[in-house]
Amino acid sequence: MITDQAKQSIADIFCHAARARLPAAPGDACEITAVPMWNRDRPAAPCAMVLTISSIGFRLLFVLHFSKDEATRAYYVGDDTTRSLPETLMELGNLCCGYMNQQLVNDFPDLGMSTPYELHSACVEYLDELRPDQVWTYELTIGGAVRLGVTLCLCAQAPLDFRAELATADEREGELELF
Amino acid sequence: MLEHYLLAACVGGIVAALAAGIFYRRKLKAGEQVQRLARERAEVLEAQLEAAHDLAEEASREHAEFEARLADLRAEAQQGAHERDALQTSLDAARAHGDEWLQHATRIAQEAARLKTLCITFERWHEQMISLMSQNRDMHKKNQELSSIVQHVLIVSLNASIEAARAGTAGRGFSIVAGEVRSLASRSQDLSKSYRESLHRNDLTTAATFQDIQAGGKMITASLGGVEALATQFQSRLEQVAA
């Protein structure tokens, strides 16, 4: 069983992580809107990168949906010819999950994070196969131009209850950035 | 003359008697003095004897106390020796335990370090996932190709039906065949779509499962790193205590 407090904490951690890590440049706007689950009438962007944070009692699947359209490419890649858009977004998704992992480790000392993998977004239609206990879906507008989607899927094998202390973590991070 | 002799004898006797009296008196006085001195000496001696007796008694008491104290000290020394022996035995046992713990701590540290290499196994599983996903991608491509062929067959069968209709009665048989081909193509298209969905489902479960294994492996490796560090600290503390 996942308590409301734990669900809210994970949602808050994600929002902080997304605002901190998903914009290409620090300070760029990142608007996050919770939306109903993707379906065939309202599909997520076609490409997806998936990454997993695992603990002893739960696993959290992070799926970042994106389109390989011109707006997204221009914002994230620009004139850089050395890296592709999926590579760039996989790196940012990895950083975003790393941020979440860093926050979660305060309450769950045994945590591990996978490497990212690219999938087709149609795969998230079958999330029920994983028997999730909680699924969150978000639409993100980055820098006022780029639209991304995020699906978070939490599968718990044990009762889950914690309260994230994000304010303290942010202050600590701010102190580190000064150096 | 005789009178003179008698007078002289009397005087002599008187003188002798006086001398004897004086002598006797002096002797008597001397005897009394001697007695007095003897008594005084005896008293002094008696006092000295009494003091000596007291000293002897005191010395005897002190001796007894000393003997008792000595006995106590001997008993304490014996007790101390027993305790020392017991402590020595305990110390030897503690040293033996310490050595045993040191060996255990060393083994735990070695085992933790050895088990950390499990990450190689997890990475192998991850590589197998990459291989499986690569095969899935290949099946996606083949299914896409099949879907294109089926779509083409569907159009061809539709054209055949149109041509058969144009042929009128002569094309009736051909129309039935074209209809059958269209039906088969339509079923193939449904099958291809279902197959694509199965592949997507398979992609998700494969990626999620192997990522869980990979992340779990990193979690285990990190935990083993913590155990190794603790065991190493414990080992060095035991070594410091032993030294």
Image (spheres, helix red, strand yellow):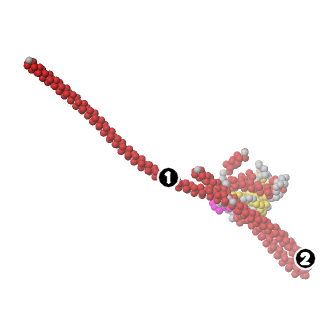
Mark 1 lies on residue: B87
Residue B89 screen position, x and y as percent: 50, 54
Q: Earlier in the sequence, mark 1 or mark 2?
A: 1
User: Who's the residue at 69% across and 53% down the image?
Assistant: A102
- Badge 2: chain ID: B
Mark 2 lies on residue: B163
SS type, badge 2:
helix
Up-down relation of residue B54 to residue B72 (above or below): above
Q: Does the magenta stretch include residue A158?
A: yes
Residue B211 screen position, x and y as percent: 72, 61
Say few, some or many: other residues with alpha carbon within 10 Å of mark 2 (under 14 / 14 to 19 / 20 or more): some
Side (left or right) of B87 relative to A142: left
Is residue A154 among what the camera can see?
no
Amino acid under disc 1: Leu
Stretch in magenta: A154-160
Is residue B184 among what the camera can see?
yes
User: Who's the residue at 75% across and 62% down the image?
Assistant: A38
- Badge 1: chain ID: B
Residue A156 screen position, x and y as percent: 66, 61
Q: Quadrant of residue A7?
A: bottom right
Q: Does the magenta stretch include residue A97?
A: no
As drawn, the label of residue B107 is: none
Residue A67 screen position, x and y as percent: 80, 59
Q: Nearer the viewer, residue B223 or A166?
A: B223
SS type, badge 1:
helix
- Kindly report which numbered mark, 1 or 2, lies closer to the viewer in this rendering: 1
Instruction: Tell me whether marks 1 and 2 sit on the same chain.
Output: yes
Quadrant (top left/top right/bottom left/bottom right) for the N terminus of chain B: top left
Structural distance between the alpha carbons of marks 1 and 2: 111 Å
